[in-house]
């Protein structure tokens, strides 16, 4: 016969007398910091020993104002069947998963047809290749 309720391990019942095996000190041992009520440690605390996150030094320089662009190369651009390409269009058609701090077009590949591309940044080679094919490389403001 199938049970009506799913199996769930019963919680440890402490302080219920010597017969339970969890009586008297209620599994906390004798005295000491861990035996007291209200005891808690912060994350990463190693008992007064210098914690690992302080031993391991910070590496490199982390620029707080760094911009991370979603990149798209010309070979991907030329495979698309649109006459006008913008960040919104790329998101709607699921060509890019998410737009970071903007869209940057890079110069790998080549463009063979006239296309209007709206982006936040262009590499020099990409801009030149788009305009050489008769298209337009339109800069748009930051998102």
Image (cartoon, rainbow, N blue to C red):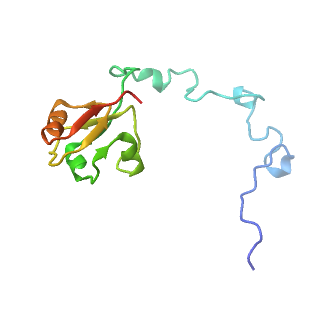
Measured from the top left, where is residue 28 in percent x and y?
Answer: 74, 37
> Is 139 left or right of 4, judged from the image as shown?
left
In which quadrant of the rendered view does residue 100 lie? top left
> Is 37 left or right of 102, judged from the image as shown?
right
Measured from the top left, where is residue 117 in percent x and y?
Answer: 27, 39
Which residue occupies 72% across, 60% down? Answer: 8
Measured from the top left, where is residue 12 in percent x and y?
Answer: 76, 49
Which residue occupies 28% across, 33% down? Answer: 138
In which quadrant of the rendered view does residue 48 lie? top right
Which residue occupies 12% across, 38% down? Answer: 132
Which residue occupies 71% across, 64% down? Answer: 7
The quadrant the N terminus occupies is bottom right
The quadrant the C terminus occupies is top left
> Is 26 left or right of 75, judged from the image as shown?
right
Nearer-the-camera pick, 25 or 65? 65
Residue placed furthest toward the left: 132
Q: Is residue 72 above or below residue 20?
A: above
Nearer-the-camera pick, 88 or 105? 88
Measured from the top left, where is residue 17 in percent x and y?
Answer: 87, 46
Nearer-the-camera pick, 94 or 9? 94
Residue placed furthest toward the right: 17
- Looking at the rendered structure, the number of numbered marks drawn on it comes to 0
């Amino acid at each position: 016969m199938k049970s009506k309720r799913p199996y769930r391990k019963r919680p440890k019942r402490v302080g219920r007398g010597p017969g339970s095996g969890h009586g008297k000190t209620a599994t906390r041992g004798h005295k000491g910091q861990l035996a007291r009520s209200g005891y808690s440690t912060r994350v990463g605390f190693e008992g007064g020993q210098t914690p690992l996150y302080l031993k391991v030094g910070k590496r490199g320089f982390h620029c707080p104002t760094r911009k991370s662009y979603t990149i798209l190369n010309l070979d991907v651009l030329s495979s698309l069947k649109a006459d006008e390409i913008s960040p919104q269009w790329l998101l709607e058609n699921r060509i890019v998963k998410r737009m970071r701090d903007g869209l940057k077009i890079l110069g790998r590949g080549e463009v063979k047809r006239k296309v209007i591309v709206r982006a936040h940044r262009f590499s020099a080679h990409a801009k030149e290749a788009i305009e050489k094919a008769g298209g337009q490389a339109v800069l748009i403001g930051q998102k």
